């Protein structure tokens, strides 16, 4: 898998977890992304940007609910978590660490020019307030966190809305500055703007958006969907009078779901004086035909949030197989590294150092018939010692857990393992991460 990930084009995008997905999100982002995710020439990274959500929203329950709804929507709409990386940003601790590295190579002036921050400052100036009134440092740092999201996974392409292009350009700037200082580690990403995706109008005919309160939720019941559709604005022409397709929100929404022929048929019916009530019925049936099959899975997931947790945690573990060794490489590059290391900044040198210095697991059987393992440092020091396991398989599984989930596994195993004399948990976790990086690298070089 590692090799594949290295050769395919990596496409990455994040979804801020502050709202409930609506038909506009579905047509503009979810549906095209799910389709694109099936392309085997690309490796997709789709994540719930919940750290970003904290910048805009201080309601914990809403962040939690939105995360569940968005995750369930993407899965119900056909995103296959086995095929892509699908994770919560906040499950990847390497992201905030990289945010700091980038913070230190990003000019404050660059961030002063970010549109979102500048808009707040302009508003304050216009109102005669202090320019930074009500501006959190989080809002100011938004582009750096986003840069870390992207650069962490060496994304090549980042599909985003127009309003986000500047952020991708800033991520490129950050990557260039970092590489200039520390060597060629980060990949410069490119924004991808979907020109063909039209903006869906909302109930009142303006762009469908939470801020206009004119949305139709992607997953409401069939009855609610019908009710909401009956509220879409139309003009006052009576049945029998010809209707304009131009400027008809109803028509535009239909078009986003229907085939070219279906759309032509509706256009004809408009010209022939179809009543608005009938048109709404046709629209309802067309949307419901597409959404109904997904609704059952959505409901199932919403009612079993632990299932969604499990999917996201599994996704995070997969993503961290890339992130953990990479942050280690970056830590080394900036000088956060073993005091005994030779200090070269090149990638090759960093992995060579890692190779010379990794710990290893030793499995063995004792007189008591039980199976044991220990983690031994490169100089032969015992870092971790297990108690007895009934079978070699059980011991092997515990080792597997430690290799996969380091700190979490250490906590989960509890009394079953003990730290070596004078060894700290942090040291063990660090050694496990190094070992993992080493294994990942071996897997890659084997091809
Ligand atoms: N800022 C993006 C938005 O509001 C969400 C986001 C966060 C994102 N991190 C990202 C998008 C990384 C692309 C890549 O739409």
Image: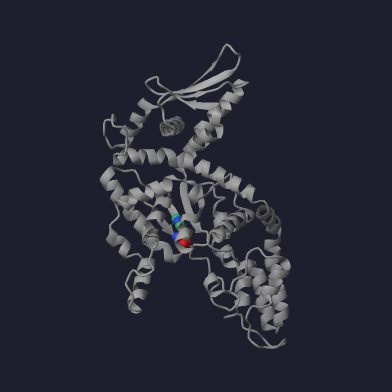
Q: Is residue 259 above or below residue 175?
A: below
Residue at the top extreme? 367
Q: Who is closer to the viewer here, 131 or 296? A: 131
Image mark count: 0
Q: Is residue 320 above or below residue 50?
A: above
Q: Is residue 265 visible?
A: no
Residue at 32%, 35% in the rendered image: 337
Residue at 33%, 48% in the rendered image: 101
**Image-based side of 367 in relation to 328, left or right:** right
| Image quadrant in which you'd find residue 262 | bottom right
Image location (x, y in percent) of residue 251: 62, 76
Residue at 61%, 49% in the rendered image: 308
Q: Is residue 363 visible?
A: yes
Image location (x, y in percent) of residue 355: 37, 27
| Image quadrant in which you'd find residue 146 | bottom left
Q: Who is closer to the viewer here, 169 or 408? A: 408
Image location (x, y in percent) of residue 336: 31, 39
Q: Is residue 147 above or below residue 359?
A: below
């Amino acid at each position: 898998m590692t090799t594949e990930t290295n050769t395919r084009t990596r496409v990455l995008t994040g979804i801020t977890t502050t709202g409930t997905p609506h038909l506009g999100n579905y047509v503009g982002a979810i549906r095209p992304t799910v389709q694109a995710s099936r392309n085997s020439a690309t490796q997709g990274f789709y994540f719930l940007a919940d750290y970003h959500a904290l910048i805009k929203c201080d309601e914990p329950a809403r962040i939690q609910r939105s995360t569940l709804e968005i995750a369930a929507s993407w899965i119900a709409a056909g995103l296959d978590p086995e095929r892509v990386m699908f994770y919560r940003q906040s499950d990847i601790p390497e992201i905030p660490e990289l945010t700091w590295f980038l913070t230190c190579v990003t000019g404050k002036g660059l961030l002063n020019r970010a549109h979102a921050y500048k808009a707040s400052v302009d508003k304050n100036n216009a109102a005669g307030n202090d320019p930074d009134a009500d501006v959190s440092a989080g809002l100011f740092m938004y582009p750096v966190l986003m840069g870390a999201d992207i650069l962490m996974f060496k994304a090549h392409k980042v599909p985003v809305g127009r309003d986000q292009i500047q952020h991708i350009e800033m991520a490129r700037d950050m990557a260039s500055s970092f590489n200039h200082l520390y060597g060629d580690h980060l990949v410069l990403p490119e924004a991808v703007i979907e020109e063909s995706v039209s903006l869906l109008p909302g109930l009142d005919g303006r762009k469908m958006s939470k801020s206009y309160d004119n949305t139709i939720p992607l997953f409401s019941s069939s009855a609610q969907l019908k009710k909401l559709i009956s509220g879409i604005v139309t003009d006052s022409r009576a049945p029998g009078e010809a209707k304009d397709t131009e400027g008809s929100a109803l028509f535009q929404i239909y078009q986003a779901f229907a085939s070219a022929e279906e759309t032509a048929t509706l256009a004809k019916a408009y010209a022939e004086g179809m009543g608005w009530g009938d048109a709404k019925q046709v629209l309802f049936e067309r949307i419901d035909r597409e959404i109904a099959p997904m609704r059952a899975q959505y409901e199932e997931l919403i009612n079993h949030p632990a299932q969604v947790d499990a999917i996201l945690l599994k996704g995070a573990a997969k993503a961290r197989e890339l992130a953990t060794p990479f942050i280690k490489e970056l830590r080394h590059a900036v000088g956060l590294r073993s005091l005994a290391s030779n200090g070269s900044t090149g990638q090759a040198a960093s992995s060579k150092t890692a190779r010379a210095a990794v710990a290893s697991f030793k499995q063995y059987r004792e007189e008591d018939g039980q199976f044991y393992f220990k983690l031994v440092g490169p100089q032969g020091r015992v870092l971790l010692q297990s108690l007895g396991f009934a079978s070699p398989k059980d011991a092997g599984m515990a080792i597997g857990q430690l290799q996969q989930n380091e700190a979490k596994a250490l906590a989960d195993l509890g009394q079953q393992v003990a730290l070596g004399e004078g060894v700290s948990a942090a040291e063990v976790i660090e050694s496990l991460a190094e070992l993992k990086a080493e294994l990942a690298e071996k897997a890659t070089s084997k091809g």
